[in-house]
């Protein structure tokens, strides 16, 4: 009964507009007062313990790397590199949005960060070339969901810390799904662009031009390579990889290209710190909820019920898809993972489901949820950046959301899509 009251209070406060970490903290206090299972001092103690892991340092550094990448001009250089290959296609700039999101996904690991960075660079040129504003906003928002799927990924770091799974295996599990998402979005772009009157991007395609474009972009392309090599090789920890990537991008921006000034650095760090602090505040309450789940035996009871009804692995995965699609509509990804992943994962393992497989499916569903009302973070960020009404953007996003869910369906029925790459290196 006490745990039910806690969840009712938490969701009620969320819907009333209270900050998520405060809603969770107040709900935790209510639970302790009603159940009397522990003193209220458990809350501050658990909050401190929740952010003591050194692996959490990777999150602010990945966020900082993304901010530095945008300010240094790396994003624009990646756009130029992508346009060399696909610019001659009709609607090449829309395809470039997807390709650049795939590349920058290898640096920041944050969908909102990628959405803000890439949209601020590409929305203007897309408007000049005659793309409808609502279409430009929709493809930029939809492509940003790839960021936390292709490594590195802030949500994958969270799941690793919640479950003690290998962050390297989680990262690599997102490689093929992320590429499939990019391909699905480009296919949808193709069908939409056919009806648009768009100019062709006039550019000479020769080895000389390619070499010139590559030299202009090579330093930007090295940034995600540093992260991927670090994760695969195992020579450095995930935190060290994040620090190395940040140091590299900072060096390129300040010394090599001189596009970042000392004055800029303070503003960049301030923005990264504010963004990181909101995430850390959420993670600080993770320990409280893990304790509640253990004390109430929620995982064991739910697991026993599912096993008693002889639910097959496929049916369970379909249930998980439906659950996290729903959760993605009503709450942010991080609290959804904090509350439900520790309960679900042991059940999945008992059913013989690979934990990397189900965790990547969960993250993918929650990232798609960033595009859906009423809570969808990317929906409102892109609406503001592109200056388009939310209701029109939702309508334009529907076909993109459907093809992304199709990718999730393929991942569900073909586990090798997730597990193949990790099995090569671990």
Image (tube, rainbow, N blue to C red):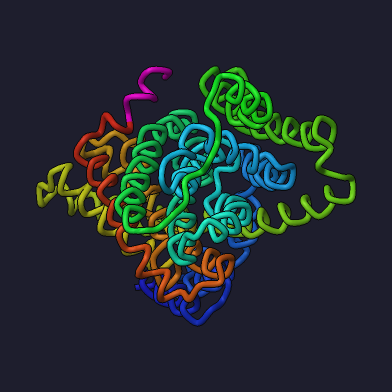
Task: Name the quarter where the C terminus is drawn.
Answer: top left
**Looking at the image, which residue sits at the far right?**
262
- Does residue 424 show up magenta in the picture? yes
**Looking at the image, which residue sits at the far bottom?**
16
- Count of numbered badges drawn on the protein: 0
Q: Residue at x 26, y 29 (%)?
A: 416
- Does residue 64 show up magenta in the picture? no
**Residue 239 picture location, percent across and down:** 64, 33
**Residue 368 picture location, percent across and down:** 38, 55
Decide if residue 320 is on the left or right side of residue 114: left
**Looking at the image, which residue sits at the far left?**
310
Decide if residue 263 is on the left or right side of residue 337: right
Q: Is residue 51 above or below residue 17?
A: above
Q: Residue at x 51, y 21 (%)?
A: 232
Q: Nearer the viewer, residue 145 or 99?
A: 99
The part of the chain drawn in magenta is 419-426
**Residue 43 picture location, percent across and down:** 59, 62
Write down the quadrant of residue 62 in the picture: top right
């Amino acid at each position: 009964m006490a745990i039910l009251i806690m969840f009712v209070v938490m969701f009620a406060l969320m819907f009333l507009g209270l900050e998520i970490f405060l809603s969770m903290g107040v709900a935790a206090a209510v639970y302790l007062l009603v159940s009397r299972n522990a003193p209220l001092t458990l809350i501050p103690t658990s909050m401190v313990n929740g952010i003591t892991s050194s692996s959490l340092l990777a999150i602010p550094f990945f966020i900082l790397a993304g901010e530095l990448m945008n300010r240094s001009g790396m994003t624009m250089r990646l756009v130029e590199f992508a346009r060399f290959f696909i610019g001659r296609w009709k609607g090449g700039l829309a395809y470039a949005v997807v390709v650049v999101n795939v590349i920058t996904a290898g640096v920041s690991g944050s969908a909102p960060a990628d959405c803000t960075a890439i949209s601020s660079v590409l929305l203007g040129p897309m408007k000049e070339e005659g793309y409808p504003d609502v279409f430009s906003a929709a493809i930029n928002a939809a492509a940003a969901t790839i960021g936390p799927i292709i490594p590195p990924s802030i949500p994958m770091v969270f799941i690793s810390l919640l479950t003690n799974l290998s962050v390297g295996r989680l990262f690599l599990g997102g490689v093929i799904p992320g590429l499939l998402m990019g391909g699905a979005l480009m296919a949808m772009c193709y069908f939409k662009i056919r009806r648009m009157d768009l100019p062709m991007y006039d550019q000479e395609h020769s080895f000389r031009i390619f070499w010139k474009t590559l030299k202009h972009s090579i330093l930007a392309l090295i940034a995600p390579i540093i992260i991927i090599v670090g994760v695969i090789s195992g020579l450095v920890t995930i935190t060290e990889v994040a620090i190395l990537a940040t140091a590299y991008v900072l060096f390129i921006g300040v010394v090599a290209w001189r596009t970042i000034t000392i004055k800029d650095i303070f503003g960049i760090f301030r923005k990264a710190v504010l963004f990181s602090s909101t995430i850390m505040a959420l993670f600080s309450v993770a320990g409280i909820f893990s304790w509640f789940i253990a004390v109430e035996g929620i995982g064991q009871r739910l697991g026993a019920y599912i096993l008693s009804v002889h639910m097959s692995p496929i049916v369970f995965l379909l249930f998980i898809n439906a659950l996290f699609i729903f959760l993605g509509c009503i709450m942010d990804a991080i609290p959804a993972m904090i509350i439900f992943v520790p309960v679900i994962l042991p059940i999945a393992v008992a059913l013989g489901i690979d934990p990397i497989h189900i965790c990547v499916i969960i993250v993918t569903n929650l990232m798609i949820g960033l595009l859906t009302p009423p809570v969808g973070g990317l929906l409102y960020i892109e609406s503001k950046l592109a200056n388009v009404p939310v209701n029109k953007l939702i309508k334009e996003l529907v076909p993109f959301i459907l093809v992304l869910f199709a990718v999730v369906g393929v991942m569900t029925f073909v586990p090798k899509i997730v597990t193949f790459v990790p099995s090569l290196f671990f």
